[in-house]
Image (tube, coloured by chain):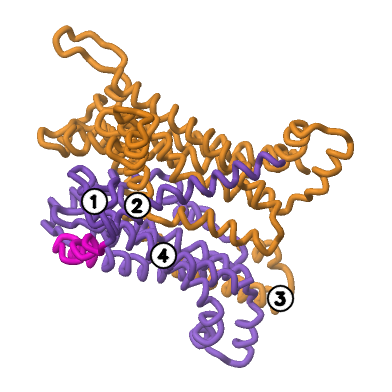
């Protein structure tokens, strides 16, 4: 299929070309996104100095780390509870619940949470970060769960049985045998959850209390105004983070094979 | 449990062994449930549970400043499809909602089609590379997918703005005198969604082609099949599961898209996701918003059902 190669090349071009001006103009000295006025780090500096950006960055990181830690922990437990076992009653329901955030459109989950959290806000007068952390943890669970489960399915129970035969307590067997073997899966799950939480716009935008902007919702708000290359600078940094994390993830997975 | 009872007349030790095996099995199941519980609690609180609250809210009366009044009403569902003229009291189809619904479906289908036209040859290209380089090509497809959707949409916006890169280049070379209005059109939404969801089309098609025996294609040529025939009779049927999966993976997020139409479509060219969010913001009609959200959910479920049915049919056809 000779024509296919041409389309494939076009496809790769299409995927990467739009990102080029985005990155290039983040280094523009002028404030235009189309006219080049010389190389400078001015907009990186201005983003760095911007207090709103600083706050949003810290909030994004705190949120992504909390959500990733909690979701990876509970997803690891759930993976241990759902793999390497003969099917038991309710197992399908557990799968359905875990995968549900992948199937329901984000906007639907977002308004559902908006309603529930509005009720809780009115009742308790609490406006903190717990809402966002809970929401993010929930939609991160399937992403953390999948690589851990995949890893577990490739491990059979013989090593754990051997450990038990050698009088290891279940806890000891888990710590010394299961956990070290499972570690790459857990790390992969954590990284996926972290990136997914860091990237979220829709649920955060609808769930956040006033003044709780994360980096993506801050950027979304900026797009309504006159855009300066500052947004490009923030985008470029986020883009670099994503690329680095995915590259690490890629090599982690490769090692497994 | 039933097993232990029916075999009760056996020897005493035998039933004792069975009973203790049964106890061990029960303990294992209990341990598994304990392990699942924390994840399930979080998911029930912040994913599945709230969906039921949306169902309740869709049957209530809107409050004056957002929120709801606890009074049963079908108005939310009613106004998804119909509207009542304020002055004459006559009923008619809700044109605004219908046009947004239709735009969502139309643009999602167009997006799926465009992604297929670009994605299928790309998947084929990757699948026919030597084994060692395939992973690199795959990696190149995956990277943009992991870049924040907002950033990718923003990149498209900068490209097609009136003062954006494309218009600036075209105007400076004198091809056009006035910038072409591309931003805030349906076309822009379609381009943006195709751009952000394209990897979701390539990956499953590649997965279905990966184990493909390309000698079949050569055999087809040897038997004097034309290129179109080889494509239609050999490649497409074998890649079908991947094509269906990819189409679903592109169609579903497109249907519920919020960020891309908001940025590239502007306030006028709304899609369903934006209409839903609007009801919880300036619209101040939470029951209508809830009913619209459930309508979207129902459409997604129908698409998923068609997919599951199709897969089941294929599986049974194979045996």
Q: Quadrant of the N terminus of chain A?
A: top right
Kindly identify which residue carries mark 1. A207
A33 vs A244, nearest the viewer: A33
Mark 3 and mark 4: Cα distance apart in space: 35 Å
Q: Which residue is mark 4?
A: B37
Q: Nearer the N terminus, badge 1 or badge 2?
A: 2
Q: CA distance from mark 2 to mark 4?
A: 44 Å
The reply to whether label 3 and label 4 mark residues of one chain is: yes
Task: Tell me the orange chain.
Answer: B
Q: Which residue is mark 3?
A: B14
Query: Disc 2 sits on a residue from what chain?
Result: A
- Left or right: residue B45 compared with residue A104: left
Say the numbered circle drawn on residue A22. Answer: 2
The residue stretch that appears in magenta: A40-59
**Chain drawn purple in the picture:** A
Is residue B55 in view? no
Q: Residue placed at 10% from the left, 33% from the top?
A: B64
Q: Nearer the viewer, mark 2 or mark 4?
A: 2
């Amino acid at each position: 299929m000779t024509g296919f190669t041409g389309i494939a090349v076009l496809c790769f071009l299409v995927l990467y070309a739009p990102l080029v001006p985005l990155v290039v103009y983040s280094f523009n000295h002028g404030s235009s996104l189309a006219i080049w006025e010389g190389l400078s780090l001015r907009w990186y500096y201005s983003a760095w100095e911007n207090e709103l950006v600083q706050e949003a960055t810290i909030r994004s990181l705190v949120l992504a780390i909390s959500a990733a830690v909690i979701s990876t922990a509970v997803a690891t437990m759930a993976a241990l509870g759902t793999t390497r076992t003969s099917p038991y009653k309710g197992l399908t329901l557990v799968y359905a619940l875990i995968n549900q955030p992948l199937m329901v459109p984000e906007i639907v989950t977002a308004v559902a949470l908006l309603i529930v959290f509005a009720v809780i806000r009115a009742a308790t007068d609490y406006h903190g970060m717990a809402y966002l952390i809970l929401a993010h943890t929930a939609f991160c669970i399937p992403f953390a769960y999948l690589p851990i489960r995949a890893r577990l399915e490739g491990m059979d129970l013989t090593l754990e049985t051997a450990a038990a035969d050698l009088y290891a307590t279940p806890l000891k067997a888990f710590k010394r045998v299961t956990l070290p073997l499972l570690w790459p899966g857990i790390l992969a799950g954590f990284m996926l959850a972290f990136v997914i939480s860091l990237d979220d716009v829709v649920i955060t935008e609808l769930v956040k209390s006033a003044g709780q902007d994360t980096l993506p919702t801050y950027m979304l708000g900026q797009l309504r105004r006159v855009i300066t290359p500052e947004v490009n600078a923030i985008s470029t940094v986020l883009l670099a983070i994503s690329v680095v994390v995915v590259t690490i993830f890629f090599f982690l997975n490769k090692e497994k094979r | 449990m039933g097993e232990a009872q029916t075999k009760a007349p056996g020897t005493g030790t035998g039933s004792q062994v069975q009973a203790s095996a049964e106890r061990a099995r029960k303990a294992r199941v209990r341990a598994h449930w304990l392990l699942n519980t924390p994840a399930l609690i979080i998911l029930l609180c912040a994913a599945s549970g709230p969906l039921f609250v949306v169902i309740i809210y869709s049957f209530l009366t809107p409050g004056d400043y957002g929120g709801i009044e606890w009074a049963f009403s079908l108005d939310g569902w009613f106004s998804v499809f119909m509207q009542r003229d304020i002055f004459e009291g006559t009923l008619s189809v809700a044109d605004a909602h219908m046009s947004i619904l239709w735009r969502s479906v139309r643009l999602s289908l167009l997006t799926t089609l465009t992604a297929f036209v670009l994605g299928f040859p790309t998947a084929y290209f990757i699948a026919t590379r030597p084994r060692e380089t395939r992973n690199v090509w795959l990696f190149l497809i995956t990277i943009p997918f992991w870049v924040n959707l907002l950033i990718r949409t923003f990149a498209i916006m900068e490209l097609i703005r009136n003062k954006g890169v494309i218009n600036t280049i075209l105007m400076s070379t004198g091809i056009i005198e006035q910038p072409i209005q591309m931003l805030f059109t349906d076309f822009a939404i379609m381009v943006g969604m195709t751009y952000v969801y394209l990897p979701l089309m390539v990956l499953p098609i590649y997965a279905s082609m990966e184990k493909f025996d390309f000698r079949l294609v050569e055999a087809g040529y040897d038997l004097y099949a034309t290129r179109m025939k080889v494509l239609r009779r050999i490649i497409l049927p074998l890649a079908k599961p991947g094509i269906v999966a990819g189409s679903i993976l592109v169609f579903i997020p497109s249907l519920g898209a919020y960020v891309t139409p908001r940025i590239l479509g502007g306030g006028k060219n709304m899609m369903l996701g934006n209409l839903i969010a609007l009801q919880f913001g300036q619209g101040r009609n939470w029951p209508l918003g809830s009913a619209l959200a459930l309508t979207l959910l129902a459409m997604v479920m129908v698409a998923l059902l068609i997919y599951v049915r199709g897969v089941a049919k294929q599986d049974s056809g194979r045996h």
